[in-house]
Image (spheres, rainbow, N blue to C red):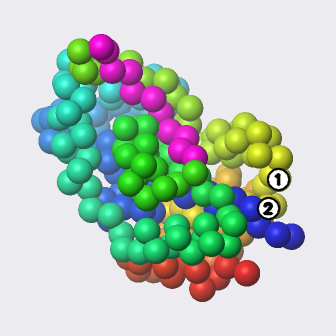
Amino acid sequence: MKFKLVIFDVDGTLTKENNSWKLIHTSLNVFEKAKTHREMFFNKEISYQKWADLDVGLWQNVHVSRIEEILNQVPLIDGIKETLSILQSRKLKTSLLSSGISLFANKLKKRFGFDYSIANEVIVNKQGYLTGEVFCNVAYNNKDEAISGLLKELNITFPQCIAVGDNENDINLFKKVGLSIAINPQDKKVAKVADVTIIGTDLRKILNYLP
């Protein structure tokens, strides 16, 4: 089976900071309130959309430039540019797939040249301020569903995909793709499901496992 698409998680996979939402909450001094929302979701009291609504609601009336300033502080792992260059030379398409916010994913897409980016759209008004609304394209545990539209558009099947991630919410996708690579997995379950596990902070390590 020839691979055609490489799908990358963002937080914790391409970044050394495993949660860009947390960094925004901390920088805006709303982290304690956000912790309550997280507990509600994992206690199955609210949906992922509701969790996102509550969290992004904490950023209401913050100017988008402030969010971008915070996201600029997120440390990235090494070798992203070089890895993308090699993948593209092999005629592989690349996509970001994140349950984080599109402001960050789109920034990485533009900077490094990923072909596609799927993440949660934070709504910004004409004056550049966040409205507190968010449209969830990627929920916590539906990455396989979230990428399915792109696969259909490109006429690509799951076995023709490589997925690179680190978290429990990558497991559903890992189980469907032809090759799954866990980078610094945050949970033993992730490492157990993945075909390959890599420890380190250089994305180029994944190239050793590509056919």
- Look at label 2 and name its amino acid: Gln
**Disc 2 target residue:** 160
Q: Residue at x 30, y 14 (%)?
A: 126
Q: Residue at x 67, y 73 (%)?
A: 90
Q: Residue at x 66, y 58 (%)?
A: 93
Residue 122 position within the rendered picture, expressed as x and y whole percent measured from the top left: 39, 27
- Res. 157 mark: 1
| Residue 166 versus residue 103 in the image, above or below | below
Secondary structure at badge 1 equals loop
Residue 160 position within the rendered picture, expressed as x and y whole percent measured from the top left: 79, 61
Q: Looking at this rendering, what residue extends furthest in the bottom direction?
A: 208
Residue 190 placement, left or right of 107: right
User: Which quadrant is the N terminus positioned in?
Assistant: bottom right
| Residue 28 versus residue 13 in the image, above or below | above
Residue 133 placement, left or right of 142: left
Q: In this picture, which residue range is highlighted in magenta?
A: 116-126
